[in-house]
Amino acid sequence: MASAATAAESLQDVMKRRGLTENDMLAAAKTYHPTGKLDEFMVFSSGGQSGQVIVYGVPSMRILKYIGVFTPEPWQGYGYDDESKAVLKQGSEVQGRTVLWGDTHHPALSETNGESDGQWLFINDKNTPRIAVIDLRDFETKQIVQNPIVQSEHGGAFVSPNTDYVIEPAQYGAPLGGEFAPLEQFNEKYRGATTFWKFNREHGRIEPENSFSLELPPYSQDLSDFGKGPSDGWAFVNSFCTERYVGGIERGRPPFEAGCSAKDHDYLHVINWKKAAELVKAGKAKKINGHNVLSIDTAVKEGILVLVPEPKSPHGADVTPDGKYVTVSGKLDSHTTVYDIAKIEAAIAAKTFAGKDEYGIPIIALETVAHKQVALGLGPLHTQYDSKPCVAYTSLYVDSMVAKWDYCEGKVLDKISVHYNIGHLMAMEGDTAKPKGKYLIALNKLAIDRFAQVGPLHPQNHQLIDISGDKMQLLYDMPLPLGEPHYAVAIATEKLKTNVRYPFGTDSRTEKKSPFAVRPGQERIEKKPGKVEVFGTVIRSHITPEIIEANEGDEITVHLTNLERAQDETHGFAISKHNGNLSIEPGKTASLTVKANKAGVYPYYCTEFCSALHLEMEGYLLVQPANYKATGAKAKEGQVYGQKDYDTRVKANNDTQAVINSVVGYITSVNFKDFPQVVAMVEDATEQLGYAEQNKKKSEEFAAKGDFNSAFLWAEQWFQYQVKAADIGLRAKTFLEQNGAKKVEAAK
Amino acid sequence: MASAATAAESLQDVMKRRGLTENDMLAAAKTYHPTGKLDEFMVFSSGGQSGQVIVYGVPSMRILKYIGVFTPEPWQGYGYDDESKAVLKQGSEVQGRTVLWGDTHHPALSETNGESDGQWLFINDKNTPRIAVIDLRDFETKQIVQNPIVQSEHGGAFVSPNTDYVIEPAQYGAPLGGEFAPLEQFNEKYRGATTFWKFNREHGRIEPENSFSLELPPYSQDLSDFGKGPSDGWAFVNSFCTERYVGGIERGRPPFEAGCSAKDHDYLHVINWKKAAELVKAGKAKKINGHNVLSIDTAVKEGILVLVPEPKSPHGADVTPDGKYVTVSGKLDSHTTVYDIAKIEAAIAAKTFAGKDEYGIPIIALETVAHKQVALGLGPLHTQYDSKPCVAYTSLYVDSMVAKWDYCEGKVLDKISVHYNIGHLMAMEGDTAKPKGKYLIALNKLAIDRFAQVGPLHPQNHQLIDISGDKMQLLYDMPLPLGEPHYAVAIATEKLKTNVRYPFGTDSRTEKKSPFAVRPGQERIEKKPGKVEVFGTVIRSHITPEIIEANEGDEITVHLTNLERAQDETHGFAISKHNGNLSIEPGKTASLTVKANKAGVYPYYCTEFCSALHLEMEGYLLVQPANYKATGAKAKEGQVYGQKDYDTRVKANNDTQAVINSVVGYITSVNFKDFPQVVAMVEDATEQLGYAEQNKKKSEEFAAKGDFNSAFLWAEQWFQYQVKAADIGLRAKTFLEQNGAKKVEAAK
């Protein structure tokens, strides 16, 4: 017996039991999402060394998706189906090696007039210099371009105000183009660079042939940003280890960390990228590995590159929303410097230079262009902007704090502790021309004691901070369960125009109609020597074909089109003991190629729990041994059915139909058309009932011929479609009842 | 200027603005975790087709970790370092193919006397029949064993009450051992099976040589459970498609789904596994692929296998906490059946059989052993148990509901809607001998409209339900961002004895001292023709060695030991443009082997943001072309320092030391020893100051010799250690200030 009635707890009871303060409840109220309430903002976070992108909602801080980018991920079929393998391969084949991971760093959302437009996402890989393009209609990676000249990068991706270029600066110096040179020639032969990738918005793809790079000194280039508004046309790239120190602790030399942080200043590189693009068009670039490169000499001669001292070891060059200033903090300095871009332009125009570096690049004195220098705290790192004018937020790594400050006046407004050792921070659309304010996220590198322990490898901790008021309020601690997120960007959810299904038979990676798509009834198997090619379909709850025969040694390719139109009705496909998994969302066509190198019996099945009959969504790949001769024997049915079974089944189906009719009666008696979700469910259920009707007819045809075994089995299939319709109908009915549907006048 | 002061919102304001009800606030209060508050329970969820395990906290529903199991995952280095590759390879090399993913289904926690003990986690792969063993001291996968006789499985892993065996039933029938046989011989040559893996608790590994299987008819075996208490020694395995129907829709036959759900009943297999183990010891097993298999004939003869009819297409055989009953629901039936295990035992003892199946297995009539049959709703699937006696919860797939019911009396107590199409459900320790009650999680297969849209592939939705009262209360919707979680298990967090560091130089996969570990100062590079082997270390913030020279074509292995003791001070390691990433937690030794197939300059670096000097934690792999002759030229320093630089640096360091001393003064002036986190930080800071002192001495030695360049650089390194100490010290100070540290009497 169940226990006696328990008095429900009051809010005060729960607060007391769980040790929550009034302030905690305020934070809870600001972040809690009851079922069905959607997040206001969506965050795209680097997945760090996982090589993926992490998507989460704000203010709930719930992770909504990991997107496969540089690392194969089987749930999505990414790197496990033929179509996505082609995308992954663009990035993974490196000098004869296969690189199946990435060290993702900085995601960037596409912009129109400096504002996030929600169309594309770009992300870089520090380890194998690459940029990936993700389409935000379906959250899938569509393209990866490898950097043809640098060996390492860090400070991309950031986009120009209309997304015509994506920037990717190098990091650790090396000879451009990948050639060998000894470290003794570091100053002479090692170089940095910044690549400007041309993005074609119409096709949604980067055009490597129209892209270019600018050769730079071997100052470890780091973060970057584009100018906007009045500073559109300029790009800013900061750097560390402009000492060009080469360590070697094992040889008795102080390590890199000592020599790379010795000077008080590093250099902010100021680049006129619009003029650079014109120079490339005018043929001023040389080619390295077929890629356009403007040399330092050309850049200096043409006046498109200057240096400005910046606080040492900075990690962020952040242009203000109005495009007037760029802010740089040095992790090993306690000052943040605000540069006046108009003053930089004026100094360049007037050639007001304080000197030049060893490579001949003009240097502008800090005092010529500094607007403010503000002591924010220890280990300042990265800055983001509020919707409120002049308000900025800077992460303080050593202090484990966020500073809120006024970059116009140069004064600190507030500080808040974070847990622990914050790297980047990120405000809602906080690096665009129109920041949205409201929330700030601290991307903390250490969590230590914040979460229940999961072994020596800890999650990171993203902390949500309310910035709507004068004082910052810590709202929520979010563990990151996979990958060290380096940087993130956020966008208002309403700006995203996301699809829930594909047009029939889409290859989602090319975003075109797949040549392998087939309509139901047109499924076929083509055999050639050594090759079996299947053109099939999937639907609740069967795969067509259900039996595939092959010979040992054959290569087998299975193309499957998902016939569903219903939202979230994804089917999967995998063959036992073979490598590969398809995620086939409604409308998609995906392909799996395997080598049948060993004779045997290999069940295949749907890998997404799609319906009550999901486990029965199965088939067999039969790989016959060499020289196998079929016996020609006929299979014995495991179970044979007669007229009585058929009659019983038909009666049960008719009873089921009566239940379905009553559900349909309820749905049509209320204002279901006011609920778009329910309208979609009704369409789906109607489709299932259509299939039920077709199978009912088949069943009746066999019964008329006296083949009651077949008649019974088709009646079973008719019933299965009824179950699917009932499933959806009941879901719709419950939704309507719980969401206040109202009776309507019966039509006619 | 910042905006004028904004009045802070009250709780009522926030509720109104966000449309939250009083009930929502109650749910928020029950789930919200302010910073530092730890979760009461920890959930280990299948990662579905991601091939991983998902770990999350309850009641916060925050995902704490993804654990790499069957699929490589670079953040953890899993499948990207040499040590874990050896584990992965145990499972991935299949008949000459490499299978780098898994379709994980049912995780199981180790038990002692039927209660979860928090020591190990087991998980299966449906696609390539395998079981993985995860050690919960560090949440790492330690072993994968491949099933040697079945082609497909589903219903594992579940453990016997003292974890001496782990069960793994087959799913889709196929000839045992992997041989080919045509589908025409389905009844004669295709078979099911259930494997019992022997687990050695002392070594924490499965012993394949002491494991065995039981041959079963080709009834698609499904879920399973072990008896406990009075039913210890029995195992229960359910099934579907006992019709043994073979589809072929492309050949005009009704699909599998029609023929596999035609009969009203499938079979619950009841197995005396203790007697089976004795029979194997007595030599009654035959060998298939070297594995012990008891035939159906032997099982029947020895009386260790009977069948009992069960409702059709069931998906769960769940033994009650007291071990008296086993509950089975059929997805295509509206009844859930409670079997009395004592009656099953009595029927077997008395041979009260109603007949036998085509394979000669005795069948017990349902009415002989049924305790109750309860109509719970449509699509009942899986049952879990409450801490309250007789209370069970069953998922209803078609109804999209959870039913709370009394399995003693056979009556429904409450129902709640979930969103949508629930598969498994899971209560806290709800499948053990001592369920903890409190919370239930609905593992819903569809999310549809519950979350902000992220493209056609939706997350799943785990919903948290409060079961502490008489009425169930829905608390929280949690999206699953990666993989379709099939089943999950939960344990009280306090039961986990998790490590935050490894003993010095541990190979975490063998859990033994690594032969490649070296102490600081003992780092070395060994070269043989074609091979470079590095024995190095990592510490904030340098890698030793910093320069590795190799020849084109060499194989390079880098072994690195993390010298840190501080919690969460993980370092990473990767070489540009090469495949592989190490995650080296404190104390761990990990290895990366790459082929240097192309001459060039490849920076390497730490891939975990470990300190303010993280970016400077770098080095160079120099791959020399064939026939390369070193010039012998000496490198020109990028920057040369003199006595003035040295003096300035020393003064700054002394100033920094004064700041550190003041922080130390504060910390020791309060009761810091009452805060274990702070004690750990103080130890870490002390260690850093020790390093600072060593480098100070080096610096002074060079200064004494008049080598001010070296003296300056070592003084820089001295400063870097000061920065690390200051970083930790400030974190400790802030923590103490914010957590109410109190002044103490000065000692002495």
Image (cartoon, coloured by chain):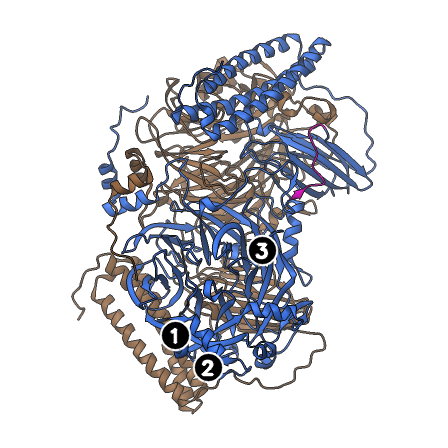
Chain colours: A blue, B brown
Could you say which quadrant of the image residue B435 lies in? top left
Q: Secondary structure at mark 2?
A: loop
Which comes sooner in the sequence, label 2 or label 1?
2
Which label sits in the foreground, 2 or 1?
2
Read off the residue under disc 2.
A352
Q: Residues within 10 Å of mark 1 (few under 14, many from 20)?
A: many
- Percent x, y of residue A356: 50, 83
Which comes sooner in the sequence, label 2 or label 3?
3
- Percent x, y of residue B692: 37, 76
Cα distance in 3D space between marks 2 and 1: 14 Å
Specify whether residue B730 is in view: yes
Which comes sooner in the sequence, label 1 or label 3?
3
The secondary structure that dominates the magenta segment is: loop
Tell me which amino acid carries mark 1. Answer: Ala
- Horizontally, residue A29 falls left or right of residue B333, namely left
For the point 54% across and 16% down, the residue is B364
Specify whether residue A70 is in view: no
Tell me which amino acid carries mark 2. Answer: Thr
Answer yes or no: are tags 2 and 1 on the same subunit.
Answer: yes
Q: Nearer the viewer, residue A584 or B735?
A: A584
Cα distance in 3D space between marks 2 and 3: 39 Å
- Percent x, y of residue A427: 39, 55
Quadrant in which the N terminus of chain A appears: top left
Q: Residues within 10 Å of mark 3 (few under 14, many from 20)?
A: many
Magenta residues, start to end: A512-521
Read off the residue under disc 3.
A132
Read off the residue under disc 1.
A370
